[in-house]
Amino acid sequence: MSETAIDPKTTALVAIDLQYGIIGLPVVPNTARDVVSHTAAIAAALRAKGGIAVFVRVANYADNGDALAPETDTPGRPAAAKPANWSDLVAELGVGDGDIIVTKRQWGAFYGTDLDLQLRRRGIKTIILTGIATNIGVESTARAAFEHGYNQILVSDAMAALTEEGHRVPVAAIFPRLGKVRLAADVLAALD
């Protein structure tokens, strides 16, 4: 494993779907609480060194008219009434005034949002990626980030999925081809 070097001035944390409607899901192998605490620690350390934190949330309009609905073999969950705070980012993240909040309407954080614009205008070259679910929003975002030419640090213990396989396969087989897979402690040490 190569050394983890981070230039905070050209690095952004991009945290996926750490919102009240998602963190209550039964995720593995890391708990939602661990994903949030690792992400919050990375955000604080990066901010302290001059980097930025981007928090991505998923939300749809009340009529769900903007929700994706193509035919699939495994349909998504039926649209149900969501609590008022469903898309609110969890308080434990410590989202601050200088942080960027991006709202997406699908799995990935790049398509249909201004994420790339926000990162490029700030001179960001590297993203540190965390969130839930590993094989859905995180993987979709990681693939797009790679296609946009960003360097990536994918923090395996700051992500979780609904199944063991949903976490294990991307972390072992996909993410090493898209960037560097590291633990939160490695990232925090590189920022120290």
Image (cartoon, rainbow, N blue to C red):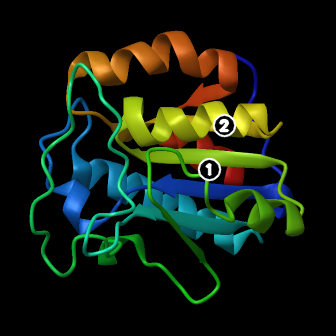
Looking at the image, is 117 positioned above or below residue 149? below
Mark 1 lies on a secondary structure that is loop
Mark 2 lies on a secondary structure that is helix
Looking at the image, is 45 positioned above or below residue 161? below
Front residue of 176 and 61: 61
Q: Quadrant of residue 58?
A: bottom left
Which amino acid, by three-letter code, is at mark 1? Tyr
In this image, 116 relative to 58: left or right?
right
In this image, 95 relative to 19: left or right?
right
Q: Quadrant of residue 158?
A: top left
Q: Residue at x 14, y 69 (%)?
A: 82
Is residue 128 visible to us here? yes
**First in sequence: mark 1 vs mark 2:** 1
Q: CA distance from mark 1 to mark 2?
A: 8 Å
Please tell me the numbered disc located at residue 144: 2
Q: Position of residue 7 (x, y in %)?
A: 84, 52
Position of the N terminus by quadrant: top right
In this image, 82 relative to 44: left or right?
left
Q: Position of residue 54 (x, y in %)?
A: 59, 65
Q: Position of residue 111 (x, y in %)?
A: 62, 50
Q: Residue at x 68, y 61 (%)?
A: 115
In this image, 192 relative to 122: left or right?
left
> Mark 1 sits on what residue?
111
Q: Residue at x 31, y 22 (%)?
A: 166
Which amino acid, by three-letter code, is at mark 2? Ala
Circles 1 and 2, Cβ within 8 Å, touching? The answer is: yes
